[in-house]
């Protein structure tokens, strides 16, 4: 087969969700026509669908090098791969370039606004730390700690009085206070980064749904893909991921608070 025939066969494999076959076909196109940007781009899409994001980014980059200022979707899809890798800076850079090439594209504008909004709220990259004004952020975290200490103190009292006689009121109150302080501080320190992670996870759901529509071949296939993806994503993946994140978020919160205190000290010295 010649390059054009391999390209058509690769497109057929891609539409049938045979991504490995598509990768093989597009690789043949690249051997025969190494200056073909669409072969790299389509192989990049195939790698993206097999979750090989580094390889996808490499192919999108090669397509962009061949045609740097003509196709906004080259940058748009590389932006998507960067989003999955958690690299917000590169994702914003790519979607800005896509918007320059095609300023009328509504999807590009909306994604750019969303990424910039998320970055402004988070202060730094997703999956690192969320810093705003150090003083305000520290106050917000302190409020969480106080509220959670109070909640756990009440829970501790209920538990204590249900296991101790009323003659041991002092002992019950002390136990409740200890439980409240430990659980409240850990929860209050960890809840800010945990909420940030939860927000990020649920905001990716619309992108998963868009991919389902893009990948589906007919209404029956769409329903099957949507049901399967949503069950795996919403009922399994997100709850499990957030549960394990809840175990490490107190440590992330401690790190964030240290950074906030350093920033606050710098502000006070200026």
Image (cartoon, rainbow, N blue to C red):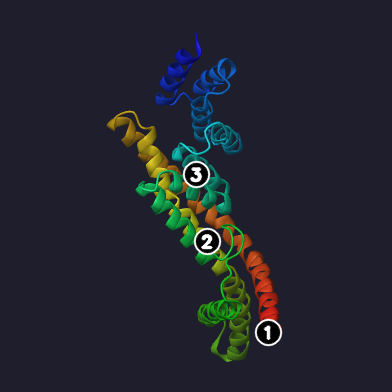
Task: Indicate which disc residue 119 carries.
Answer: 2
Which of 235 and 177 lies nearest the eye of the viewer?
235
Q: Which residue is mark 1?
A: 268
Residue 263, position as x, y percentages in the image = 67, 75
Q: How many marks?
A: 3
Which of 204 and 79 lies nearest the eye of the viewer?
79
Secondary structure of the residue carrying tag 2 is helix
Query: Hey, which residue is sitting farthest top in the picture?
Result: 1
The residue sitting at 53% across, 56% down in the picture is 242
Residue 217, position as x, y percentages in the image = 34, 28
Q: CA distance from mark 3 to mark 1?
A: 40 Å
Pointer 2: residues within 10 angstroms few (<14), some, or many (20+)? some
Q: Which residue is mark 3?
A: 80
CB of mark 1 within 8 Å of CB of mark 2?
Answer: no
Pointer 1: residues within 10 angstroms few (<14), some, or many (20+)? few
Secondary structure of the residue carrying tag 1 is helix
Above or below, 78 relative to 264: above
Above or below, 264 relative to 117: below
Which of 219 and 21 lies nearest the eye of the viewer?
21
Secondary structure of the residue carrying tag 3 is helix
Residue 154, position as x, y percentages in the image = 51, 81
Which of the two discs, 1 and 2, labels the residue nearer the N terminus?
2
């Amino acid at each position: 087969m010649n390059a054009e025939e391999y390209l058509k066969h690769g497109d057929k494999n891609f539409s049938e969700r045979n991504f490995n076959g598509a990768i093989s076909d597009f690789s043949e196109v690249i051997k025969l026509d190494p200056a073909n940007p669409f072969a790299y781009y389509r192989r990049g899409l195939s790698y993206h669908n097999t979750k090989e994001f580094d390889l996808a980014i490499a192919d999108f980059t090669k397509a962009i090098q061949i045609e740097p200022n003509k196709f906004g979707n080259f940058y748009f899809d590389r932006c998507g791969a960067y989003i999955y890798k958690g690299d917000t800076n590169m994702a914003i850079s790519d979607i800005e370039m896509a918007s320059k090439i095609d300023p009328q594209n509504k999807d590009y504008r909306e994604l750019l606004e969303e990424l910039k909004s998320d970055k402004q709220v988070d202060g730094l990259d997703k999956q690192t730390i969320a810093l705003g004004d150090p003083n305000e952020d520290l106050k917000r975290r302190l409020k969480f700690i106080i509220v959670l200490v109070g909640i756990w103190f009440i829970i501790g009292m209920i538990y204590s009085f249900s296991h101790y006689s009323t003659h041991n009121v002092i002992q019950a109150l002390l136990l409740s206070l200890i439980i409240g302080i430990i659980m409240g501080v850990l929860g209050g320190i960890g809840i800010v980064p945990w909420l940030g992670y939860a927000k990020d996870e649920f905001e990716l759901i619309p992108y998963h749904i868009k991919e389902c529509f893009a990948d589906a071949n007919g209404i029956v296939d769409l329903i099957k893909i949507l049901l399967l993806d949503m069950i795996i994503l919403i009922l399994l993946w997100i709850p499990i991921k957030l549960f394990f994140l809840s175990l490490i978020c107190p440590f992330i919160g401690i790190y964030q608070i240290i950074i906030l205190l350093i920033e606050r000290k710098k502000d006070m010295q200026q």
